Image (cartoon, rainbow, N blue to C red):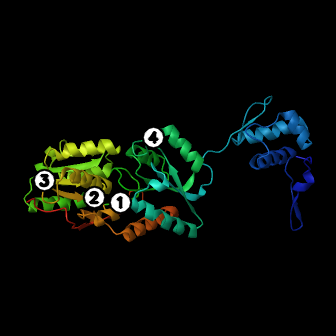
């Protein structure tokens, strides 16, 4: 600071009345605060002697100003030592003009539906002066430490969060702190967070009815699921299989392609009548293993995916699957996020989208 403080700058006049000017210590405190906020100092302020020289005032006035700032919580220290600046945490900072999309993936690794949703959502948010920010949290589908989540919150502090494929423990962390967030995908039923998801449990119930109608014993049905088994995966398994079969007929697939291939081969060795996958990529992997064994659908067994992707309809044979219109997903996400940003969305609300069965060539009675 080049110029010493002058009280004549701080007269306030209203009409013909001059208001009482503040004390020199209050003016010094305001100047020090402004310098801190302007980045003139880092985490530690200079000592009292240096501050007094810079401000052109006596050290007793400087110390009085510093005590005022200590009382507000901005500074930490003692009269004889240089003060430490206490930066406000994210709970007290104004949220940044952005929405953070948190997932265990980089943007280029997103599955088909969220990958198509993201650019459209970014354009919608830009119209409202908000930026869509992608943040990868490694192994977010399995969990994260509270310390890493606290650090993430402080460093980003957005207007709202979008949680995609985040574990129940991470979702619970956000719920406990009442942070504005929207879950895309499954969440535990007892967790008070708004969400948008496809009702895969309804799809599984519909498929169970078809299985019963075709006379196939449920003991001949295998369900292939991701190894992390999010809440939606569990609900779908409960809707498809009788309780006594859920432990033995639900197979969690490894993410490693070689390990997954071995698990699928072991499942096919059990000679199932129907294989149901909870992810589209698992259905493609099953088709590959069937080709390697010379097996055909539905001659040797049926295959149904509870999740859709563009590749399932163009494969030969075309895979029977449950599908939901992308426009419906986009509409539900944008509407829910808009309500969340306005503060008008209830904690336990959201939208469940009902998928439709798309009959391909892989579902039928084995010959």
Q: Secondary structure at mark 4?
A: loop
- The picture places residue 38, in percent across and down from the top left corner, at 77, 50
Q: CA distance from mark 3 to mark 1?
A: 29 Å
Left or right of 360: which side holds 326?
right
Residue 197, numbered label: 1
Q: Nearer the viewer, residue 85 or 283?
A: 283
Q: Nearer the viewer, residue 300 or 119?
A: 300
Residue 144, numbered label: 4
**Do callouts 1 and 2 mark residues in contact (Cβ within 8 Å)?**
yes
- Look at discs 3 and 2 and give the one toward the viewer: 3
Residue 345 appears in view = no
Q: Nearer the viewer, residue 341 or 343?
A: 341
Left or right of 238: which side holds 172?
right
Pick whichever of labels 2 and 4 is earlier in the sequence.
4
Q: CA distance from mark 3 to mark 4?
A: 39 Å
| Residue at the image position 71 percent from the left and 42 percent from the top | 74
Q: CA distance from mark 1 to mark 2?
A: 8 Å
Pick whichever of labels 3 and 4 is earlier in the sequence.
4
Check disc 1: other Cα within 10 Å, few if <14, some if 14-19, many if 20+: some
Q: Which residue is mark 3?
A: 273
Quadrant the C terminus occupies = bottom left
- The picture places residue 49, in percent across and down from the top left corner, at 88, 33
| Residue at the image position 23 percent from the left and 63 percent from the top | 317
Q: Is residue 221 above or below residue 49?
A: below
Left or right of 91: which side holds 56?
right
**Do callouts 2 and 4 mark residues in contact (Cβ within 8 Å)?**
no
Residue 200, numbered label: 2
């Amino acid at each position: 600071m080049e110029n010493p403080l002058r009280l004549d700058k701080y007269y306030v006049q209203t009409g013909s009345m001059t208001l009482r000017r503040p004390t020199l210590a209050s003016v010094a405190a305001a100047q020090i605060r402004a310098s801190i906020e302007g980045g003139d100092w880092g985490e530690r302020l200079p000592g009292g002697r240096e501050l007094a020289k810079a401000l052109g005032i006596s050290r007793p006035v400087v110390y009085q100003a510093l005590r005022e700032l200590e009382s507000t919580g901005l500074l930490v220290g003692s009269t004889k030592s240089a003060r430490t600046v206490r930066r406000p945490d994210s709970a007290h900072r104004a949220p940044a003009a952005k929405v953070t999309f948190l997932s265990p993936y980089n943007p280029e690794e997103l599955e088909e539906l969220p990958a198509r949703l993201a650019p459209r959502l970014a354009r919608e948010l830009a119209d409202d002066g908000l930026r869509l920010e992608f943040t990868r949290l490694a192994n977010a589908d399995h969990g994260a430490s509270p310390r890493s989540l606290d650090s993430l919150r402080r460093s980003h502090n957005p207007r709202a969060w979008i949680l995609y494929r985040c574990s129940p423990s991470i979702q619970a962390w956000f719920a406990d702190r009442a942070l504005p967030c929207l879950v895309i995908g499954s969440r535990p039923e007892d967790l008070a967070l708004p969400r948008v998801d496809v009702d895969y449990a309804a799809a599984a119930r519909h498929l169970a009815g078809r299985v019963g109608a075709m006379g196939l014993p449920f003991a001949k049905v295998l369900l292939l699921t991701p190894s992390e088994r999010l809440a939606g995966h569990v609900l779908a398994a409960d809707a498809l299989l009788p309780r006594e079969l859920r432990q033995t007929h639900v197979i969690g697939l490894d993410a490693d392609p070689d390990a997954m291939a071995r698990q699928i081969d072991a499942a096919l060795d059990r000679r199932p009548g129907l294989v149901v996958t909870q992810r589209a990529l698992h259905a493609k992997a099953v088709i590959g293993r069937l080709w390697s064994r010379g097996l055909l659908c539905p001659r040797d067994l049926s295959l149904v995916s509870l999740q859709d992707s563009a590749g399932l309809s163009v494969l030969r044979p075309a895979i029977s699957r449950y599908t939901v219109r992308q426009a419906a997903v986009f509409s539900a996400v944008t509407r829910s996020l808009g309500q969340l940003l306005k503060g008008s969305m209830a904690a336990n609300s959201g939208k469940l989208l009902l998928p439709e069965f798309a009959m391909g060539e892989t579902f039928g009675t084995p010959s």
